[in-house]
Image (cartoon, grey):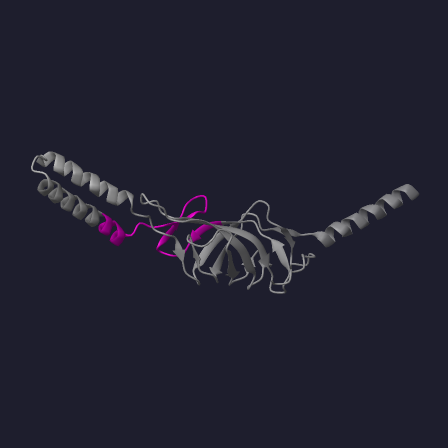
């Protein structure tokens, strides 16, 4: 009887302990909309810092998973535009989220979209510029102009140059002009909304954020 009583007491205490630590709310797979409070660009130095803020609470079932005003901090992984019309690109790497009370947690977020009409986001979360019609028209017009000028110069410079060969020189000059053109850069202004999704390794937060978070490090 004494053994059974001790077992019952242990089970009751274990149940209470589990009840105190649960329920736990996982952020994995949750989507949120943040607002950039830093302008970002593919021309920024690598590892430049950026910040974004949660303007509305992230709600769970009957409770808030993250409060309004939660700050997300991270760094950029840019690739500047290059010649041969190679556009720049930009990845956002989220490092941590800072709660309104100043405590912070690690953050594993994936960018899913950017609400800015001049850029697009691929399936891997990389931001790329959309092709500008004005830029495309400039490149086509410039190539045609270069081809015509080179064609005319070739015919005038040497009487022995055939018309077909002069045209070939003109096309080569036009191709060279196009290859020397840089692609567009990624530029996203401050205040732009971005959509993110929490990854598999997101922290587990108790209801009401009652867990003991890491203290915020002092600002440099």
Please identify the quadrant where the N terminus is shown.
top right
Q: Which residues are magenta?
A: 111-139
Please identify the quadrant where the C terminus is shown.
bottom right
Quarter assignment of residue 66: bottom right
Instruction: State the image coordinates of residue 101 (x, y, percent, origin top left).
Output: 63, 65
* Residue drawn at point x = 53 percent, y = 54 percent: 74
* Residue drawn at point x = 13 percent, y = 41 percent: 154
Which is nearer the eye, 65 or 75? 75
Instruction: State the image coordinates of residue 144 (x, y, percent, origin top left).
Output: 17, 46
87 sits left or right of 153 in the view:
right
Task: Indicate yes or no whether the magenta region holds residue 132.
Answer: yes
Instruction: State the image coordinates of residue 24 (x, y, percent, origin top left).
Output: 65, 51
Q: Is residue 1 in view?
A: no
Instruction: State the image coordinates of residue 71 (x, y, percent, origin top left).
Output: 55, 60
Task: Indicate yes or no whether the magenta region holds residue 170.
Answer: no
99 sits left or right of 155 in the view:
right
Extreme-left residue of the structure: 159
């Amino acid at each position: 009887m004494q053994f059974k009583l001790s077992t019952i007491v242990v089970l009751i205490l274990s149940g209470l302990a589990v009840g105190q630590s649960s329920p736990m709310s996982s952020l994995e797979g949750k989507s949120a909309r943040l607002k950039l409070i830093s302008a970002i660009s593919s021309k920024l130095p690598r590892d430049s810092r950026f910040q974004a803020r949660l303007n509305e609470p992230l709600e769970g079932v009957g409770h808030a998973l993250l409060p309004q005003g939660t700050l997300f901090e991270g760094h950029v992984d840019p690739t500047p535009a290059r010649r041969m019309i190679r556009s720049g690109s930009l990845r956002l790497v989220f490092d941590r989220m800072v709660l309104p009370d100043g405590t912070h947690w690690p953050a594993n977020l994936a960018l899913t979209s950017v609400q800015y009409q001049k850029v697009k986001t691929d399936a891997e979360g990389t931001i790329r510029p959309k092709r500008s019609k004005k830029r495309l028209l400039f490149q086509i017009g410039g190539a045609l102009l270069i081809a015509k000028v080179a064609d005319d110069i070739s015919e005038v410079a040497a009487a022995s140059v055939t018309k077909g060969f002069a045209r070939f020189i003109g096309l080569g000059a036009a191709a060279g002009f196009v290859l020397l053109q840089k692609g567009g850069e990624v530029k996203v202004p401050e205040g732009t909304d971005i959509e993110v999704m929490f990854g598999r390794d997101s922290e587990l937060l108790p209801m009401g954020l009652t867990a003991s978070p890491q203290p915020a490090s002092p600002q440099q």
